[in-house]
Amino acid sequence: MTGRSASTKSSPPPSTSTPATTPTPSSVRSDPGRTPRPLGGSPGAATCAETWRALHEWVLQYLCRPHPQLGRPGAVCPYTRRALETGRLHVLVWPWPVPDTQALTEIMNKWADWFERVCGDDDGQALLVAFPALPRPSARRLIEGAQLLLKTPLAQRGLMVGEFHDGPPPAHGVRNPGFRPFHSPVPLLALRRMIRPDLVFLRDDRAQHAAYRTRFPDSAVDNPLEPVPALNL
């Protein structure tokens, strides 16, 4: 699959200062000075530098490296390494408070629109949207609640959304049920294109499985409740 590569000529991302009125997702999306940037590049003078550095360190030292509890060889997230090395791992820092799960869901829907428009059907692209202003412990509840609300409608658009926070989230590893891999130093939601190995994450929900079958109609597994062969995840 191919798609348009995200532009790296954008202006600096969101300012660290809180505006007099928190902007709506649509106003931020339409402002060329507030767009996601490739993680490997400069964060820009106006970005939340501390959050940016924390995410960069987390991606390099955690997602892109093996973990003894993972249950398989290789990096925690091989997908992330590929996106980072090719300049297609984008980051947006949302530095303003978010009042509830519905507001967080609306914000992510706007950035899903951006992702589809800019990244197209390129399954090598990924977007991390970080929310450093979410206070503990509400950050955990908001991130997990938004992911639950977003997962099915985004799957129907051919997108996957993942939840990360310092809890970590209760979701366990595919190979090791005792390992909870979605730990991050900053609350965030991640977007990327659905790929074939994602069946293991979608097979137990009929609507999500139907979305998978729409994207990959030649998949060998028809019944969402049947066991799936071992995947390299």
Image (cartoon, grey):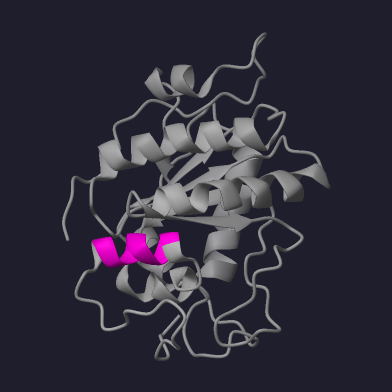
Q: Which residues are magenta?
A: 207-214
Residue 22 screen position, x and y as percent: 63, 16
Quadrant hosting residue 208: bottom left
Q: Is residue 50 visible?
A: yes
Question: Secondary structure of the magenta portion, mostly?
Answer: helix
Which residue sits at x=67%, y=38%? 101
Instruction: Identify which residue is drawn at 64% across, 39% down.
Output: 131
Residue lying furthest left: 2
The image quarter containing residue 97 is top right
User: Looking at the image, which residue is at 69% across and 55% down?
Assistant: 165
Image quadrant where one finds the C terminus: bottom left
Residue furthest right in the image: 137
Residue 45 image position (x, y, % from top left): 52, 28
Q: Check the image and report above or below for 111 versus 188.
A: above
* Horizontal side of residue 138 vs 114, given as left or right: right
Q: Position of residue 58 (x, y in %)?
A: 60, 60
Q: Nearer the viewer, residue 227 or 87?
A: 227
Figure disc tally: 0
- The verdict on residue 81 being magenta is no
- Please determine whether, in this image, residue 54 is positioned above or below residue 49: below
In x, y percent, where is residue 226? Answer: 44, 86
Q: Quadrant of the N terminus?
A: bottom left
Asked if residue 194 shows in the view, the reply is no
Question: Is 4 on the left or on the right of 68, as rendered?
Answer: left
101 left or right of 1 in image: right
The answer to whether 59 is drawn above or below residue 3 in the figure is: below
Residue at (33, 52) in percent of width and height: 88
